[in-house]
Image (spheres, rainbow, N blue to C red):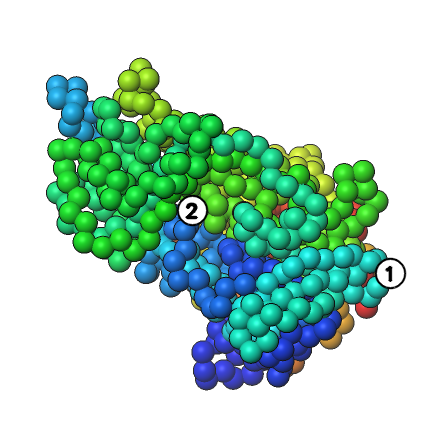
Amino acid sequence: MQFHHRGYVSENPRIKPAAGHGINRPTEIPDEMDVLIVGTGPAAVTVAAQLAHFPSINVRAIERREGRLTQGQADGIQARSVETFQAFGFANAIVDEAYRNVEMCFWKPDEKNPENIVRVSRVPDDAHGVSEFPHIYVNQSRVLDYFLGYAEQAPGKVLPDYGVEFVDLEIDESHDYPVAARIKYIAGPRQGEVRTVRAKYLVGGDGARSNVRTALGHKLEGDASLHAWGVIDVLCNTDFPDFQVKCSIQSHSSGNILLIPREGGYLSRLYVDLGNLDENDAGEIRKTSLDEIIRRANAILHPYTLDVKSIAWWSVYEVAHRVTTGFDNVPADRIGQQHPRAFIMGDACHTHSAKAGQGMNVSIQDGWNLSWKLAAVLEGRAPASLLDTYSSERRVIAQDLINFDKEWSTLMARPVEEWNDPQDLARWYEKTIEFPMGFMTQYPKNQIVAGLEHQHLATGFPIGKRFKSTEVMRRADNRWRHLGHLHEADGRWRVYVFADGAAPANSGTPTADFAQWWLNDAESPRVKYTPHNSDTDAIFDTKVIYQQDYTQVEPGDVPAVFKPIKTPFGLVDVNQIFASGHGRDIFRDREIHQDGAIVIVRPDQYVAGIFPLSARHELKTFFAQHMLPAK
């Protein structure tokens, strides 16, 4: 991380000085605010963390619980989420305390003795190198802690208001704060009091039984699978040899188990097959006792046993696959004519099984997709039409998730005798691994995703998909760095200029010509949208990557636009210049054309467009669709 550019820092540089609404932040919820967040689930805390970076925005988050979550139901963290944690500055810390998944073992009935189970295969977790980040398991409560810690340390100093419940809302566009929300204090000295507060925008991340969804008139639509599972977080002694390895376990006649190791080295989660439901009496299965779940687990694991010493958490649930009828308050017949004021995210929008570990992960991406857009609109950097893209982008992803999870949960529950080949489940898991890892998302063309006309210039960065990092040499300190890891959750657009084959120069090359235009021309998006008297990279984090070996790149030969100026001292940042070296060649690894390319990446790490170094009109047109000139 970079710091000291605002002045010498001797304390923890991750704790930012309070600014704007973060200064003397009132303990009481104000009557009016910019954003009211309902809930503190994964999507909601991501919004809180991102908006806390912008102290000009007045943000409050309410939660009906009296304090932090202590036992989260979700625990699987896919690699895409860990990439996101990197942007928020806590990837290393959470990986250190989590269980790191490296493979999945598949167990089936022994052909010679079907009453016993045997291991039949092992599948590496990421055999194809989809991501440099790991797949981990850690309690959801810790994920929330990290996001809320980031929000508290950011300039906006956002903290949840616990013991406060959302009741309902009304929206009046004639008011400066159009959303009137009734809230109720359900704990503390004001318990029972109901009051109305107003907000410019309201974000509902209040779970599958969302009051915000109900207030917006939406409902979850879909169906249940009529199959039930018991889930236990168990501390035990066992002779099962893979108790600390992710496993799919299929018995001959007792059902199936999905075993998920947990952080700490002693705890594991077991999803235990409870069988099909009677559609006329589906509620009866929810009465299954803890003892019965443990008995069934032991039957499935035969000849191995679990000697249970403690249960940290347990539940019984049936699998349901449902998507909400809407992601915001705009009626279907008003889309494109009316801009949203209230949104729902996470489990309020999509419910599914826990088998693929997608609930928390998809929710985090819901929250980040929306929050950077809210910040841009509220700070006057983007028109309100930018917010239309939240629903159009995330609803498709939610439906894709439901479709995937239906197939995965069906396969997990399929009786062993219905499989032609005991290896088929393992093959399906390996073939589809990119989806549960979080990397299949590809946003279509819209105002913040360009067309595919220039995709051939950088085929390793598919437009609409997340920016897949790789290593480059940073010229300032001659160290290799993962380029994507420098992308912080600061709301800025990334402009990666992959230089043409000429040596670095201040003039006379396509890269230098682009640099001069990007730095100085009145029609350049950098000039047009960057506020005066701010860092010259305040809106566009512009980096250059040369094809030459780093030993052939001298900072003095690099155009000034790649050496931004920082306020208040006018310090020159030389950390944005990169090259090849020590076997690292991003041009080779990401199939970047030798004539060079410009790769534009959104604030939430998705590739927004690829353009040639000669692009002028195309860049102006692209950013004009979703940005407002600086005042």
> Which residue is label 2 attached to?
78
Residue 339 sits above or below residue 528 on the image: above
Question: Horizontal and vertical percent for residue 8?
Answer: 52, 84
Question: Horizontal and vertical percent for residue 155?
Answer: 59, 74
Circle 1 residues within 10 Å: few <14, some 14–19, many ≥20: few
> Which residue is label 1 attached to?
174
Of tags 1 and 2, the one toward the viewer is: 1
Res. 625 in view: yes
What is the C-alpha distance between the residues marked 1 and 2? 43 Å
Q: Is residue 330 left or right of residue 454?
A: right
Residue 601 sits above or below residue 332 on the image: below
Residue at coordinates 65% horizontally, 59% vertically from top-left? 167
Q: Is residue 41 left or right of residue 184?
A: left
Q: Quadrant for the C terminus, please.
A: bottom right
Circle 2 residues within 10 Å: few <14, some 14–19, many ≥20: many
- SS for callout 1: loop
- SS for callout 2: loop
Residue at coordinates 33% horizontally, 40% vertically from top-left? 288
The one nearer the camera, 324 or 100, is 324
The amino acid marked with disc number 1 is: Ser
The one nearer the camera, 64 or 114, is 64
Residue at coordinates 34% horizontally, 30% vertically from top-left? 275
